[in-house]
Amino acid sequence: MTCEVAVMNKRGIALAADSAVTWTDGYGNRNKVDYTAKKLFSLSRNCRPPS
């Protein structure tokens, strides 16, 4: 399950998401959990996520 948060005001927008991803074998059996996935990506060269 992904958790996402967005906060917006007149000066900008802040986005946040968790980093956990779960892979399954297609039958519902959990195979692997990765806690370092990147879920936010830049849509423009003018908008960069924090490093």
Image (cartoon, grey):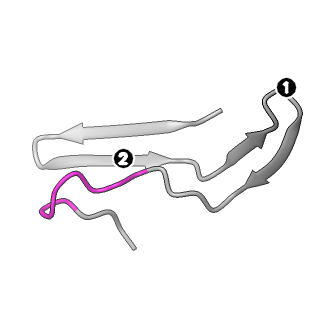
Q: Quadrant of the N terminus?
A: top right
Which label lies toward us, 2 or 1? Answer: 1
Specify whether 10 is left or right of 37: left
In the image, residue 4 sits, relative to residue 50, either above or below, namely above
**What percent of the width, then of the height, locates residue 39?**
48, 50
Q: Secondary structure at mark 1?
A: loop
Specify whether 39 is left or right of 12: right
User: Where are the magenta residues, as a range?
Assistant: 40-47
Amino acid type for the residue under numbered disc 2: Leu
Q: Secondary structure at mark 2?
A: strand
Residue at (72% x, 56% y) in the render:
34
**What percent of the width, then of the height, locates residue 44?**
16, 56
Q: Which residue is mark 1?
A: 27
Residue at (10% x, 41% y) in the render:
10
Q: Which residue is mark 2?
A: 15
Residue 42 on the magenta segment: yes
**What percent of the width, then of the height, locates residue 33?**
78, 51
How many marks are shown on the rendered structure? 2
